[in-house]
Image (cartoon, helix red, strand yellow):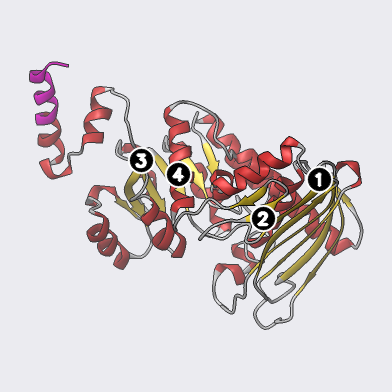
Amino acid sequence: MSLKNRREVIKALAFGSGAMLFSPNSLLAATGKKKDRLGVALVGLGYYSNDLLAPALQLTKNCYLAGIVTGTPSKEEIWKKKYSIPDKNIYNYGNFDQLANNPDIDIVYVVLPPSMHREYSIRAAEAGKHVWCEKPMAISVQECTDMINACNKNKKSLAIGYRLHHEPNTREYRKLIKSGALGKIKSLSCGAGYRDDRTNHWKQKKEMGGGVLGDMGVYAIQGSRCGSGMEPLSIISATVSTTRPEIYKNGLDETVVAKLEYPGGLVADIKTTYGEGMNYLNVTGEKGELRMNPFSAYSGVKGQSPLGDINHPYNVPMQQAMQMDDDAMAIMQNKPMMVPGEEGLRDIRIVQAIYKSAAEGKSVKLT
């Protein structure tokens, strides 16, 4: 494009939208040039968006915070000033679908209670945006499938926010497992939990996708899958319990313990809870042991293996920055997501099987 034509494009954009609304990414979209950074809109401005994702987006190279979607008007002005978000990139749940008309926003990151993931992921895909969705992916296998189908239909990528797949220490121990450095895995245990005394959060509301298994339990499930390097065949047994029925009401799970059967006779013991702190992955093989503690902390993952310490240090919120940079680059290069929707679906299938095993008091095969 000649300098003269470039100026005409800028002039037209400024005249149509107001000079203050112009951005370099708008020019790239208008001229057909490939963007070097993708715009992300965060949907839901709770703790995870406020304390981790938004700060991480100040560190990313391949994407940036372009917009927000919130149902709380008072948050709009705060975020607008803090992150210099233009008015045209601020949405609420009533005008959400108008994202389709905004070229600044390439990706919608759904950071809502799990019961809302399906709806807003599908609406984002139908608006022509790539979708990133926090875990748990959804509250059922069917909802996960609907999300995958919607993104495929609209030719948009879908990534689930499993930050640990992008985390260097996790990648190192997974490579070690895959290499056979431990030999045949003989035993595995994994625990993920913290003390949650809240009473009115979505995690304490079944209808919103609450309960520990879909939340912290996904970490324990992932730990067993990554630590074994295999996929489970069945849930041998499971129990669901609570010591605080006044908080975790009507059978809502505060603590879940389960045994997962893997190929070769391996039995993995997992525990997840809102009743106490735990963050470990222990894998014992014929040639040695892997001990990751913590195996999923925001502040860092570290451990020991037969090959030495596993400890690449970094600061919060680098895990989220690495995750979003990797996923944005995959979109720009038209490559598969590191954690696609199918990965989230696998875990929800296991979650449902654990619940079924606990309810029926018997083993449940995974198909």
Residue at point 82%, 45% (across, down): 287
Q: Secondary structure at mark 3?
A: loop
Residue at point 73%, 35% (across, down): 179
Per the image, the residue denoted by label 4 is: 324
Per the image, the residue denoted by label 3 is: 61
Instruction: Point out the tag, 3 or 1, that comes first from the N-terminus.
Output: 3
Which SS type dominates the magenta stretch? helix
Q: CA distance from mark 2 to mark 3?
A: 29 Å
Per the image, the residue denoted by label 1 is: 232
Tell me, yes or no, whether the two marked residues, 3 and 1, touch with CB atoms within 8 Å: no
Q: Which residues, given as a range, are shown in magenta? A: 1-11
Q: Position of residue 130 (x, y in %)?
A: 45, 37
Q: Amino acid at mark 3?
A: Lys
Q: Position of residue 227 (x, y in %)?
A: 73, 48
Q: Amino acid at mark 1?
A: Pro
> Split into 4 quadrants, where in the image is the N terminus?
top left
